[in-house]
Image (cartoon, rainbow, N blue to C red):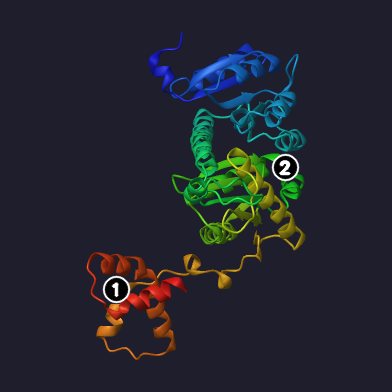
Amino acid sequence: MTTEADQNLPRVLIIDDSRMVRASIIRHIRDRFDVREEADGEAGWQTLLVDPTIQVVITDIGMPRLDGYGVLDRIRSSRLSRISTLPVVVISGDDEPEVRARAKNAGATDFISKSIGNVELLARLEALTQLAQTQLALEKSRAAALANASNVESAAAQPSADSAASGASPVPFLRPAVELAVVVIEIDQFERLVSRYGAHVAQLINRKLSMILATKLRKEDSVAELQQGRFAVVSPKTNINGASAFALRLRHAIEHVVMTYREERIRIQITIGIASTDTDRVTEQGPALVNQLMDLAIQRIALGRASGGNRVVSEGGEVLPELMDRPARAPVSIDQLLLQVKSGVAVDEKFRQQLLEAIRTLAPLLELVESEIPSGLSPVSLARAAHAG
């Protein structure tokens, strides 16, 4: 019987036709893990379908009804992400390189011998359950984000105040009530990564991108994994400049990621397509609007891929950092500028550009001051001009 204390422990499913092997593993790990056990692959698979709390699978290879390779194939091809991303440890008495290689190519996360020591077994399982918990947190975040996306779609479906007041009939091209951007991110040559390194390594790369992506999002953004190697981000109240700046930052972060597999360094590149309501002539409303923008963004990924990949593409073509408006520029330190003024810095062209950027940064604040306390100060008019530019 499972106790309340057991429910707080990470759950491991052991699939092995040997009762003695299952009992031996359970004896080693029962103090730190809650364990379920099955005697063949088919029974193990049925347990996975009905028990969403399982975080790691340990499976033997040679079993009746469904062997370990069959279990791996069903797990990795499952349409349920909670199953397809599970860490799977193959445990076998046959430690030949060919067996190990076949298990890895089939999608095994790890391969261990039945003679493995207690300490090493615990260390590996704890590392894998930590990975599974991180993945579960990401899945919950995605689910919450997608729920938020439905609210965005509903808001986008509302007619603007001007059109409602005028009673105007719908027109072929619409301007939604809220700015909305869709960013689709694709790992370059993902199928080649699968072919060269195996599904398990490609899956780790996919997971790495999802984790980096999660750190770059705002709480109002929605993210979903469209397929392995491709993600979509729906960003309300975001125009093309904001979406492009986000895409460039993400691509820059990915370029610095290096993964190691069998002493080989793997670098990742991504291609990003962007569509937004302030630049694209949209014809849909509500939920269909997000789908329309997503289709446009995917088409732009194809353009970026055809140009060699590692690109950000919007309605206007490739997005380059030097062509970006203010949101993509490095922030200006007002304190640093004041220190330079106090120290008597020479006013050269570089300093003038910094001053203009500072004015653009402060423009909204200066406009508020002018509206609340009209003074006719010349910097305000200058700020408005700079902000408009």
In this rendering, would 253 be left or right of 91?
left
Query: Percent from the top left, x then y, of residue 63?
Result: 73, 17
In this rendering, would 302 be left or right of 265?
right
Residue occupying the point 49% across, 23% down: 29
Q: State whether residue 280 is above or below residue 351.
A: above
> Which residue in the structure is indicated by mark 1?
335
Secondary-structure class at tag 1: helix
Q: Quadrant of residue 7?
A: top left
Q: Which mark is residue 198?
A: 2
In the foreground, 27 or 7: 7
Q: CA distance from mark 2 to mark 1?
A: 52 Å
Looking at the rendered structure, the kind of residue marked 1 is Asp
Q: State whether residue 278 is above or below residue 389.
A: above
Residue occupying the point 61% across, 13% down: 20
Query: Percent from the top left, x then y, of residue 321?
Result: 57, 69
**Of callouts 2 and 1, which one flags the residue occurring earlier in the amino acid sequence?**
2
Q: Quadrant of residue 52?
A: top right
Residue occupying the point 50% across, 66% down: 328
Residue at the top extreme, as displayed: 1
CB atoms of marks 2 and 1 within 8 Å: no
Circle 1 Cα neighbour tier, 10 Å, few/some/many (<14 / 14–19 / ≥20): few
Residue 289 in view: yes
Circle 2 Cα neighbour tier, 10 Å, few/some/many (<14 / 14–19 / ≥20): some
Secondary-structure class at tag 2: loop
Q: How many marks?
A: 2
In this rendering, would 104 be left or right of 236?
right
Disc number lying in front (2 or 1) = 1
In the foreground, 215 or 245: 245
Looking at the rendered structure, the kind of residue marked 2 is Gly
